[in-house]
Amino acid sequence: MTLKEQILEFCSHLYSNTMRSLLYGLVLLTVCSSYKIVIFAPDISNSQVGWNKRVAEALAQAGHDVTVILVQTMEDAEKDVQFSKDVKVHALNASSGITRSDMEDFQKKAVFGDLALWNLEARKHMDLFMGMLFDGCKLTLQNKEFMQWLTDQKFDLAFVHMYHTCPIGLVHASKIPSWIWLNSGQLMDNVANAIGVPTPPSYVPPLMMESSDEMDFVQRTKSFIGHTLYNLIWPWIVVNKETQIFREHWDPEFPDIMDLIKKCPLVSMNFYRTFEIRRTLWAV
């Protein structure tokens, strides 16, 4: 073999190995850019399931491995929302027996009537709703098969909803390394306060207050009282109770969920910035 032929053979061999390595690298890069994601979706209404469906399908179309855990805390929730075949759906039965009809009467009066939050009937139905979520959290932790499955899946990222804090505890219990707090509407007041978003009551009314960001003195006073009470009551009636549930049914040394919340890496919201009240966040 002549020197020229030897050089050509060497170059051909080098080119072949280089292209093979490049192809392997591209394949590896594709795998590394894809994440295994779980979304905890409350199966309590079509609107909530539909919102989580949109998030899940967008992530799946981007090439991620997406699993939606439909947490069924209500016996007869509607099943009108269908997920695409790219999204895995895991139904989790965490119902304590509450039905849709148990909640509909209150929803009609609250949405179409003039039912104040301090009304005795309103408080009763709010206790019913939150009790349903707390019981669902307890039943989830007692489901050892599901908890083992959740840990074994080794998800890279979790999306948790804003209704209560049990999913945040599940993220920690199953050792999922990172999570995103998913708000199906605007930034919730409890979420803003927990993660340290500035919420001056003179310009940002509480979520349930009938007011814009332009308030007179009386409205600002009401806003201040509303924010103060809510920020005191929410940890007491939600976070503390669910922390206790985890300590009773999972680990006596389980950390305070409020401490986990304060380490939240990212919050995602479903709103258009133009229509959101201008918190100090937007000026940062």
Image (cartoon, helix red, strand yellow):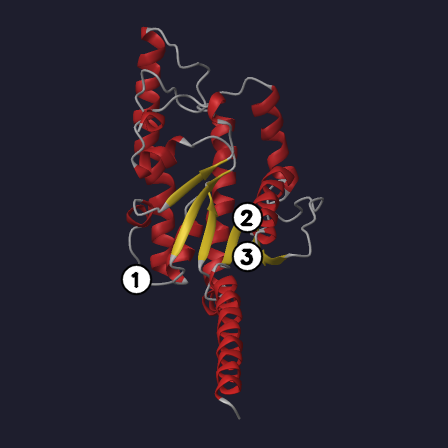
Give the amino acid type for the residue marked by disc 2 in the picture: Ala
**Whether residue 138 is situated above or below residue 76 in the rendered picture:** below
Residue marked by disc 1: 252
Specify few, some or many for label 1: CA neighbours under 10 Å numbering under 14, 14-19, or 20 or more: few
Query: Is residue 149 placed above or below 64 in the rendered structure?
Result: below
Q: Mark 3 points at which residue?
A: 64
- In the displayed structure, 185 sits above or below 223; it is below
Q: Is residue 150 above or below residue 158?
A: below
Q: How crowded is mark 3: few (under 14 residues within 10 Å), some or many (20 or more)?
A: some
Q: Name the residue under label 2.
A: 41
Q: What residue type is labelled 1?
A: Pro
Q: Residues within 10 Å of mark 2 (few under 14, many from 20)?
A: many
Q: What element carries label 1?
A: loop
Q: Where does residue 171 sit, x and y in percent of width and height?
A: 41, 56
**Local SS, label 3:** loop
Q: Is residue 218 visible?
A: yes
Mark 1 or 3, closer to the camera: 3
Distance in Å between CA atoms under marks 1 and 2:
27 Å
Sequence-earlier tag: 3 or 2: 2
Residue drawn where x is 37% and y is 39% of the image:
237
Looking at the picture, tell me which residue is in the foreground, 108 or 216: 216
